[in-house]
Amino acid sequence: MTFLQKITKGTCLLAGAVALFAAAPASANTFLPADTLIKATGNPLFTHKYTADPAALVHDGKVYLYAGHDEAPNDFHFYRMHEWLVFSSPDMVNWTEHPVPLKPTDFKWAKGDAWAAEVIEKNGKFYWYVTVTHDDTKPGKAIGVAVADSPIGPFKDARGSALITNDMTTGTPIDWDDIDPTVFIDDDGQGWLFWGNTKAYYAKLKDNMVELDGPIKTIDNIPNFTEAPYVHKYKGNYYLSYAYQFPEKIAYAMSKSIEGPWEYKGILNELAGNSNTNHQAIIDFKGKNYFIYHTGGVQPHGGSFRRSVAIDELFYNPDGTLKRVVMTTEGVQPAKKNTKPAAKGKKNK
């Protein structure tokens, strides 16, 4: 997750049950059985538990949505996150919640906090880059990597040690600047890791995806960088979106090269409801582009520490710039069936 952070809504249906599941208020933090079916009816997507810091992956005709689990009680005013969640959907409306795939305790060198993370596939393996708190041997936030043969796991520590620790970055005096990892694999197969808080860092990855392949560099020419970098590519343009100022909006910059220079383009997404943080993922699925983020939209107790994931469409201008995301309560709607009666042919006289 990020040093600042995130939220979700929907209507739930228990797998194998005929009756509609009446979702408990998110404040109850209800835990559902494995492989639960959920039909999202708008934004936020899910209401049965709080979800934050979304990451998304398209694989074999499905969207896999990964999120941190906000578990803070209503009277607790900071992040409490002990696990990551995974959901999958063939249509962005009907979702399956799978068993919890990963926890900070799965990294023996870490001592807690399931903050923002990112999953990416390469050569049939699924790599999950996570933000955790390192144990006392290396204080501060750190980035680890888990790996699996399936997008829903089981995932295991790919290194046995952190990929990034606080002593590797000296751009700021804070110990939480190594958070919010995101990975982009370019057309040539080269992987790149981006991360940071108050400083935007990036580095090449080796082909094994679990080691750096060169020095850590910084991006210094984008304004008001807070955290949550995300990189995608569309029609030859690279896009770097990120959390901007605090409370956080999402802004973006463009480049013709993965290493910049980046040209700032403006705000992409406004303040996310009553959440101080925002965190984005961008995907292309079945011919449409989607912007995935979190808000504090599940009421009565949603907010900065009880966030929920939402999804809206993303649109490009003819010159490649991005249109500002319109946050909606409708979200992604199911495709409408054609109810028009078929035209009848004329009878020959």
Image: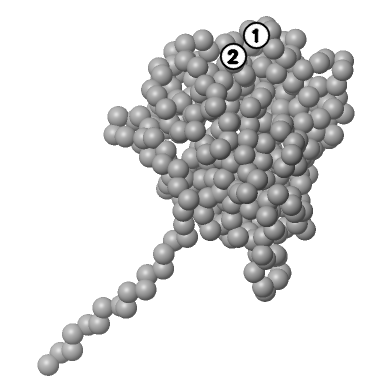
Q: Residue furthest front?
A: 75
Position in image of residue 76 (x %, y %): 75, 36
Residue kind at label 2, given as amino acid type: Lys
Tell me the tag on residue 199: 2
Tell me if residue 186 can be seen: no
Q: Residue furthest bottom?
A: 349
Q: Report which quarter residue 306 is drawn in.
A: top right
Residue at (52% x, 21% y) in the render? 245
User: Would residue 261 be found to the left or right of residue 95 on screen?
Assistant: left
User: Which secondary structure lies at badge 2?
Assistant: loop
Residue at (67% x, 60% y) in the render? 23
Eyeballing the image, is 343 above or below 13? below
Q: Quadrant of the N terminus?
A: top right
Q: Which residue is more in the foreground, 234 or 55? A: 55
Q: Quadrant of the C terminus?
A: bottom left
Q: Measure the C-alpha gap from mark 1 to mark 2.
A: 7 Å
Residue kind at label 1, given as amino acid type: Thr
Q: Which residue is mark 1?
A: 172
